[in-house]
Structures are given as C-alpha cells and as structure tokens.
Image (cartoon, coloured by chain):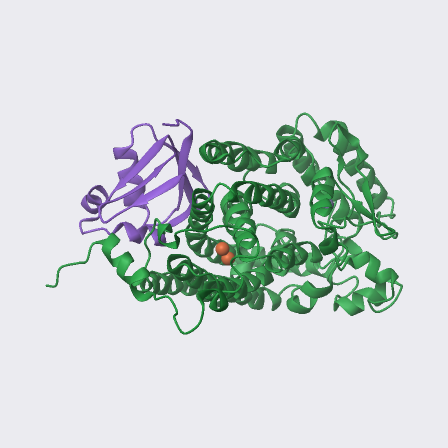
Chain colours: A green, B purple
Amino acid sequence: MAKKIPLKRKYEMMTRGLAWDTTYQDMDDVYPYDKFEGIKIHDWDAWEDPFRLTQDAYWKYQAEKERKLYAVIDSFAQNNGQLGLSDARYLGALKLFLTGVSPLEYQAHRHFAHLARNIRGTGAQVAAQMQSIDELRHAQTQIHAISHYNKYFDGLHDFTHMHDRVWYLSVPKSFFDDAVSAGPFEFFTAISFSFEYVLTNLLFVPFMSGAAYNGDLATVTFGFSAQSDESRHMTLGLEVIKFLLEQDEANVPIIQHWIDKWFWRGHRLLSLVGMMMDYMLPKKIMSWKDAWEMYFEEQGGALFEDLARYGIRPPMHAEQANNEKHRISHEVWAIFYQYTHAAGFHTWDIDDEHKAWLSAEYPDTFDKYYRPRLDLWKQMAADGNRYYNMALPQLCQVCQIPMGFTEPDDPTTICFRSREYQGDRYHFCSDGCQYIFDHEPEKYIQAWLPVHQIFQGNCGGAEIPDVLNWYHLNLGVDNMAYEGSAEEKIWNDWMATRRVGAART
Amino acid sequence: MSTNNVSITLQNTEDARPIVEAITADNPDATVHHYPAMVKIDCPGHLTISAESVGERLGRDWDPQELHLSVISLSGNIDEDDDHFDLSWN
Ligand SMILES: [Fe+2]
Ligand SMILES: [Fe+2]
Ligand SMILES: [Zn+2]
C-alpha cells in the first residue's frame, strides 16, 4: 500500500504547490483589489489553514454530509414531519429565518467566489473556494426546506422577491450589501471574523438546538450540517485576523475599526434572533441573555484577551451590547407585534406560562418594563381591539431596524441620534449605528430605507394593502394575529385528526 | 497560558459519541453540557483530541479530519495534525 502523505506536506502540495506568480502580466493587474484598503501583506505564504483541508478531503467529507442530510430531509417530507412540530407558532421563527437568512447564504456564496479569484494568497484562495461552495450548499438545502414548508404553510411562497422588498428583510439584506460592497479584507473581517467567528454561534447553535427541541427535524439537520462547515468558516475568520495583524503593525488600527463597526452591525442584526429565541420558540432552550453571556461575554471575552497581544481591544460598543442583553428581545418583539399586519408571519399574545418563563429569565427587566405592555395588549385583543400600529416607523439609517431601542442608561426612553450631512438629517437607533455612519456617510446616505421608499411612492402605493401587494404578501393570510388565522385553524384541525386517529388505535 | 475556556460543540450523533468519550477521558478538566441535539464541551486553557484515543473507542483508525462531520462550533486557536486536534488560548 502506498504510504500516506503527512497532512502538513499534503496541504503544502495542494495549495502553494499548485500556485505560480504571473510574469506576462503584473501581479497587481491580475489582483487589482487587494491593496486599496491600505492593508499591507509581506508574505502570503505565512497563511495557514489550521484544518489543512485540501480539495480531495473536502469533497469526500462534503459528499458524506450531503448524503446524511438528504436522507433526513427526504424522510421528513415523506412522513409529514411538519406534523411533529411543537406548535404552529414555531413557524414564525422559521419563516423569519428562511426569508431573512437563506438569501444571505447565496450572497456569501457569490462573494467568496469573488474573493477566491481576487486575493493573491493561495492558502486563502483555496479556503475561499471551499467556503463559496459551502455557502451555495447552505442556500440549496434551505431552499429545499422552504419548498417543503411552503406546501403546508403561508408566507414562504416568494422568498427572493420578498427579500428585496419587505421592510424588515432589508435589515439582513442591507447588512450583507454593506459587506459585499466593501473591500476584500473588510469583508473577511465583517463576515468571517465578526459575524461567523464572534456572533454566528448565537444564530445557529442555540436556535438550531431549539429547532430540534420543537420537533423541526428538517431545520436542525440543515442547520447543523451547515454549522459543520461553519466551524471551518469560523476558523478561517480567526486565522485571517491573526494573519493580517501579524503581517504589519499598520494593519492594526484598520482592523480595529472594522471590528468595532461589524460587531455592532452584527449585534443589531441578531436582535431579530433574540426575539425568535425568547418569544417565538414554543419550547424554550435558553434565553437570549444566557446565549449572549455564553457566546459573547465568555467565548468572545477569551478571544479578545487572546488578541490583546496584537494590540486589539474588545469592540468599541461591547459594553453597550452587554447592557442590552436584558432588553433587546423584548423591544424587537414589541416592534413585530405592532407591525405584524405588514409582515410575512404572525405574532400572538403571550400566555401566562410564557410570561412566567420570561420573568424568571429576566428578573431585572421583564416584570418592571415589559409585562405591563404585554398584559395591556392581551386585554385589548380580548376586548376585540387587537393593537396594530398604523403609522410607519422611523428607521435607523444604518441597521434599518425601526427605532424601538432605548437609551443606554434608561430602558424607558427611546434612543434617538441624528446627524446632519450635506443639508439632510439622518437618524440612528444607537451610538453604535451613528459611529458607523460618521465614518462612511457617503455610503449610508445611499441606503434604501423601506419606509422612506413607501413615502416616496416607490412601493406600489400609499396604503398598507398596496404595499403588501407589491411585497407579494397576502394581507390577513400570511400575517396579522396568529389567533384566528388560517394557519392556527389548519394546525388545530390536523392535531384534532391526529388525536382521533390515536384514540382509535 | 490563559485559563479561559476553550470550547467545542458536537452533534448528538453516533459519529460524535466516541469523540466525546475520548475528550472526557483525556481532558480531566473538561465539562460536558448536554442540549437538545448537541453537546458542548468546555475546558480551561487547552483541550486535546487524540486520534489514537478516538480510534480505540471506534475499533478502527480515526482521522482527525473526520471531525468535520460532527463539529458544529469551536472556540480557541486550532492545531491539527495526523494524530491530534488541539484547541488552546495563548
Ligand atoms: Fe452559510
Ligand atoms: Fe458560513
Ligand atoms: Zn441602528
């Protein structure tokens, strides 16, 4: 039997061993994008993928992952797996995930392909090639899940169209547009490091475990299959940062600014996940606050201590984010509850058991600030006057979330920040978003803000039904209160049939 | 060396079970947390996965790259070779 080539040697041969420098054309002309951000790189060969994954092994393991994943997805579809969900309310979280995140997987696929072509280090090229293919796989498997759920439930019928238009989907869309319109090293810092390494655990790990707990086999399976690639992406994120910091001291302040910016961008984006975890999973696995402590304060804390040797400090607004862990899920749920008539999923009144859980998880804030509001809304609904907010909200110019977040030192006052730039006034939800605007106003003044666009007459009309039509959402079917919805009815009918069936056997 | 926790999260699967067993046997300071569908293992400063130790439990050779089939999250600097997979903080 031929002797196995040691891993380190094989990695050498399959990365740098396959590369050459161009001579007919200047390398700077072949790779025109990897210098303009001011990042200095002296030795691309110092780049090492710690997994030392080469293409041959990559295809072998990915094929194995796909075989396992599709076996589960197939049997889920064949056996009406959707009937095993804990409750149809769970679908709200799933719909938000699939319409908000799945298109980002595709964007990531495209941009890593771009990086694989446009950065000149071979190790980095190979890692970006693999990630590009991974992200395409993630998009595909999630679209298969959409296709299955769309047969039985509302709101998933036109997800690409919605992603480009719907007001809250502009939050994830604009986040990624911001990243792909940056240079290659900012993109790596934004997506690979700040998002995938520092924050993505909060999106995928407790939420997917929650999906399992709520009987959603399809989602936990595509989620964890994707996350097995994600641990490689996270590693790339950490390696890229260490590599850039080691290459030249002049890179340190540039990277620090990007970390400050993208930490806050990611934190705002994940406030939607906080709402999903605390309010939308019928069976809870951990609160947003606990997840934040575990993944950002503990793991992120260890990471930034490790990076201190390069002169990197924790993200600028980290303290503020830690402070917000007691609030944001409640604040975001309040936004969606009020505007559920303009969304692609339902919201509902919170029952007593759920309130008791929130109260136990958030002893400092829930009973004091949020319970009274939920009680009032529940009473209004009982009186036949379910609360829908008919005024369109002011959006933050940077994160594009309605301005429902509160002052750092006062959870009862909405936080407003604003700046004048070239004669126009721009609004922000927080110091973090304002800081981001101040560094690149010429970028953010171009933001496509859904509410501004509605008022400018670019979204199908001035009334909510016109706008929903333009979104391809069906008013009163895909959205509004869960109580009394078609989805609630069909779910209850299925469960009743199941009980009758069970009684017979 | 830092004593901050490094961490690895694996799926709750047949493939991952011998890996979890090897980690707990070889890293006495490791703490194992069970969640629906996953297992998170934390360990102060450093954690090692020995290919030999996993292989003994499996009854066949185990390549540390097979970890790709089971791992869902990591925290710490990675050092991987033919016979081990290590996580550490500096
Ligand atoms: Fe992905
Ligand atoms: Fe990824
Ligand atoms: Zn904002």
Residue B85 image position (x, y, % from top left): 29, 44
Residue drawn at point x = 71 percent, y = 55 percent: A443
The N terminus of chain A - image quarter: bottom left
Q: Is residue A469 above or below residue A404?
A: below
Name the outermost residue toward the bottom: A24
**Which quadrant holds residue A16?**
bottom left
**A398, A254: nearer the viewer:** A254
**Which quadrant holds residue B20?**
top left
**Which quadrant holds residue A497?**
bottom right
Residue A56 image position (x, y, % from top left): 30, 65
Left/right placement of residue A305 relative to residue A387 reads: left
Residue A46 image position (x, y, % from top left): 36, 50
Residue drawn at point x = 87 percent, y = 63 percent: A456
Residue A350 image position (x, y, % from top left): 72, 41
Left/right placement of residue A303 relative to residue A383 reads: left
Residue drawn at point x = 21 percent, y = 44 percent: B57
Residue drawn at point x = 52 percent, y = 44 percent: A251
**A409, A482: nearer the viewer:** A409
Whether residue A76 is visible: no
Ligand 3 found in image quarter: top right
Name the outermost residue toward the left: A1
**A84, B81: nearer the viewer:** B81
Q: Is residue A251 above or below residue A459?
A: above
Whether residue A159 is visible: yes
